[in-house]
Image (tube, helix red, strand yellow):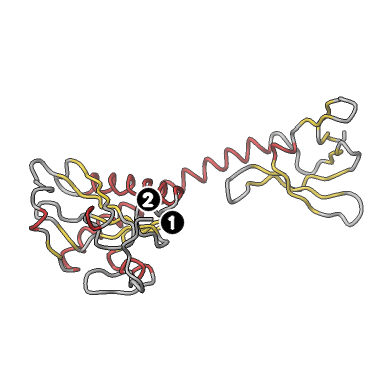
C-alpha cells in the first residue's frame, strides 16, 4: 500500500543492522538495541539541534502504512525511552520533538520506517532551518553516542533489577498456592506430584511443573490459573481440578 521503494532497493538501515558501514553511518552510531528496535545517532543535524537520533524497527517496513501494530508499539516505547535519555543527558536541552515521514510528499527519503527524536531548545527554529541541515562526521557524533549509551546501559541495568525483583515476588506468591513436593489428585482420579512452580518465559505467567504417578511418569506443565480452576462435572457438581492428597 502506498509504496515508493524502488525495486532492488539497498536499504542503508538494514545494512547497519547487518553490521555494515556506509559514507553516512556505521554500527558505532548505535546507542540502544533490543529485539525489535535499534537507535542510532543521526548523521544529519540541524544547526541548533545536534545529536538527534533515529529509531528504526529491526525488520524492514517501508512506512507507517506497512508496519504492523506490534512493531509500531515497540517503536513508540523506544521513542519514549530515547526522548527521556536525550532530555536527561544533553546540556541545556529543554524538550524533545518526534517526527516521522511517509512518501516523497511527506519528505521521506529512506524507504525504511524511522522516527526522528530531536533535542529542543528555546527558539531553536528547528522547522524553519531545514535547508541548513548538514551531514556530520563520526567524531562530531561520538560525544552524543557516548552520553546516550551510558544512560541506556545504566537504566537497562536498573530495569533488569526491578524486573527480576518483580518476577521473584510473582513466583513467591504463586508458590504459596501450590505445595512443591506434595501429591495432588486430578478430578479424574489420577495422582500427580508437584515438582516446581515456575514462570513461562514468553509472558511470565506462573505455571506448575508436575509428574504423573502412573504409567511412564510423564512430566507436565500447566498454567497456575488452570491448575487452580474449578471443573463442572457431567452431573453438575463443581470440584477443584486438582486437590491435595493429605
SS at circle 2 = helix
- Secondary element under disc 1, as helix, strand or loop, is loop
Residue placed most toward the observer, 236 or 3: 3
Crowding at label 1, few (<14), some or many (≥20) Cα neighbours within 10 Å? some
Q: Are marks 2 and 1 in contact (CB under 8 Å)?
A: yes
| Residue holding disc 2 | 75
- In the image, is residue 83 above or below residue 50? above
Residue 19 is marked as: none
Q: Is residue 24 left or right of residue 160?
A: left
Image quadrant where one finds the N terminus: bottom left
Pinpoint residue 88: horizontal percent, then vertical percent. 24, 45
Q: What percent of the width, then of the height, locates residue 97?
A: 22, 45
Residue occupying image coordinates x 69% and y 34%:
176
Q: Residue at x 89, y 57 (%)?
A: 216
Above or below, comparing residue 121 to residue 25 in the picture: above
Q: Position of residue 41 (x, y in %)?
A: 25, 59
Q: Which residue is mark 1?
A: 36
Amino acid at each position: 500500500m502506498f509504496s515508493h521503494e524502488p525495486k532492488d532497493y539497498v536499504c542503508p538501515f538494514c545494512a547497519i543492522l547487518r553490521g555494515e558501514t556506509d559514507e553516512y553511518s556505521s554500527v558505532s552510531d548505535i546507542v540502544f538495541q533490543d529485539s525489535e528496535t535499534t537507535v542510532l545517532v543521526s548523521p544529519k543535524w540541524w544547526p541548533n539541534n545536534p545529536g538527534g537520533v533515529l529509531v528504526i524497527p529491526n525488520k524492514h517496513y517501508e512506512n507507517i502504512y506497512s508496519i504492523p501494530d506490534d512493531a509500531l508499539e515497540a517503536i513508540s516505547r523506544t521513542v519514549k525511552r530515547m526522548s527521556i535519555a536525550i532530555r536527561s543527558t544533553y546540556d541545556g536541552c529543554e524538550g524533545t520533538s518526534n517526527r516521522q515521514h511517509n512518501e516523497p510528499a511527506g519528505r521521506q527519503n529512506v524507504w525504511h520506517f524511522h522516527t526522528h527524536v530531536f533535542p529542543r531548545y528555546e527558539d531553536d527554529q528547528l522547522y524553519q532551518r531545514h535547508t541548513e541541515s548538514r551531514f556530520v562526521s563520526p567524531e562530531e557524533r561520538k560525544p552524543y553516542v557516548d552520553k546516550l549509551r551510558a544512560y541506556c546501559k545504566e537504566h537497562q541495568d536498573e530495569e533488569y533489577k526491578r524486573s527480576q525483583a518483580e518476577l521473584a515476588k510473582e513466583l513467591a506468591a504463586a508458590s504459596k498456592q501450590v505445595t512443591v513436593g506434595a501429591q495432588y489428585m486430578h478430578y479424574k482420579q489420577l495422582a500427580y506430584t508437584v515438582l516446581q512452580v515456575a514462570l513461562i518465559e514468553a509472558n511470565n505467567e506462573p505455571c506448575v511443573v508436575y509428574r504423573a504417578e502412573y504409567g511412564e511418569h510423564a512430566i507436565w506443565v500447566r498454567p497456575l490459573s488452570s491448575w487452580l480452576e474449578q471443573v463442572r462435572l457431567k452431573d453438575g457438581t463443581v470440584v477443584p481440578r486438582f486437590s491435595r492428597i493429605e
